[in-house]
Amino acid sequence: MSVDFQSWSSAHLSRFETVLGDLLPPGDVAPQRLHQAMRYAVLDGGKRVRPLLAFAAAELVGAELSRAQYAAASVELIHAYSLVHDDMPCMDDDVLRRGKPTCHVQYDEATALLVGDSLQTLAFQLLAEHRLSDDPQRQLEMIKLLALASGSRGMAGGQAIDLASVGKSLSVPELEFMHIHKTGALIRAAILLGAHCGNATAAQFSRLDHFGKCVGLAFQVVDDVLDAEADTVTLGKTAGKDADNDKPTYVTLLGVQAARSMAQQLHQDALDSLVEFGGAAQRLRELADFIVLRKY
């Protein structure tokens, strides 16, 4: 590819930030405080890994960027809502996210709760009101896909298992089950939603889903390592929070070195699932590299 990964991702992120700003309600429209808090929670922060995965998968199957941007936005809004709720006192009770005060600290708990609710519903509004596919049935499938990835059989279910696991000793398979839901489900959804904007075949979906499963787990393993080793300034969130809360992690179960080895193996498995795509999957390969090699 003629454009390097840094240039590709920077260009996409710059456009995407504008797209998000346009899709979120303006801060001067009633109810102003809620809308301002929604924008605070979403804009100007985060790695935007999920949107980039959606864009890369969309490009792989020849989908139009103008369609994929709504799929990418819907996933990022779900992700942002989950962070707002995760940080609240009834969950992880954190005060720092993306290098700034968490939403309930900057505003208040009631507003933060409504921010999460509003971002979640806006995500599904985007999938319903914009044409993402020429096939209406495929677009309905996209709505179902994101709902499953977000709910009790996906991200929310994983968070419930996480909360129930505090102070307990889990096996590696039990930890994987939790994170396939809590972290992995939305990452897999981002990739598949991007592919749904084009004309991916069943075989392509299967390979992309396996790729998503591997990078989703790798993302969490690396997160656990960084939580144990990096500092708060680097992470943009409170370092060591999992250990302080007595949560089971890949580091507490395996140790740092074995956790790193696990991430490397998942990375290789992810890359192997893209072999048949050839050079067309280069952006997905580069994103897998970023996920595993990142420092924050």
Image: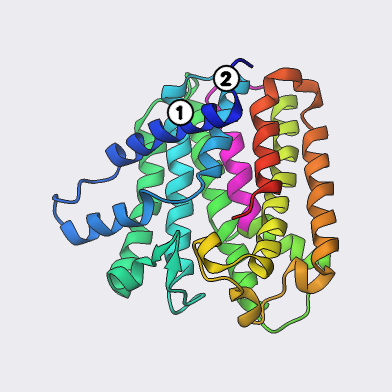
Residue at image coords 45%, 28% = 11
The stretch in magenta equals 183-200
* Residue 150 % position (x, y): 53, 53
Q: Nearer the viewer, residue 127 or 251?
A: 251
Residue at image coords 27%, 69% = 107
Residue at image coords 70%, 32% = 285
Rendered image: mark on residue 11: 1
Q: Residues within 10 Å of mark 2 (few under 14, many from 20)?
A: few
Residue 177: quarter of image: bottom right
* Disc 2 target residue: 3
**Amino acid at dot 1:** Ala
In the image, is residue 215 above or below residue 118? above
**Amino acid at dot 2:** Val
In the image, is residue 139 above or below residue 25? above
- Residue 74 at least partly seen: yes
Quarter of the image with the N terminus in it: top right
Quarter of the image with the C terminus in it: bottom right
- Report whether 222 appears left or right of 235: right
Does the magenta portion include 278?
Answer: no
Residue at image coords 40%, 25% = 131
In the image, is residue 284 above or below residue 264? above
* Residue 96 % position (x, y): 44, 69
User: Considering only order in the chain, which callout, 2 or 1, is on the residue closer to the N terminus?
Assistant: 2
What secondary structure prevails in the magenta region? helix
Does the magenta portion include 186?
Answer: yes
- SS for callout 1: helix
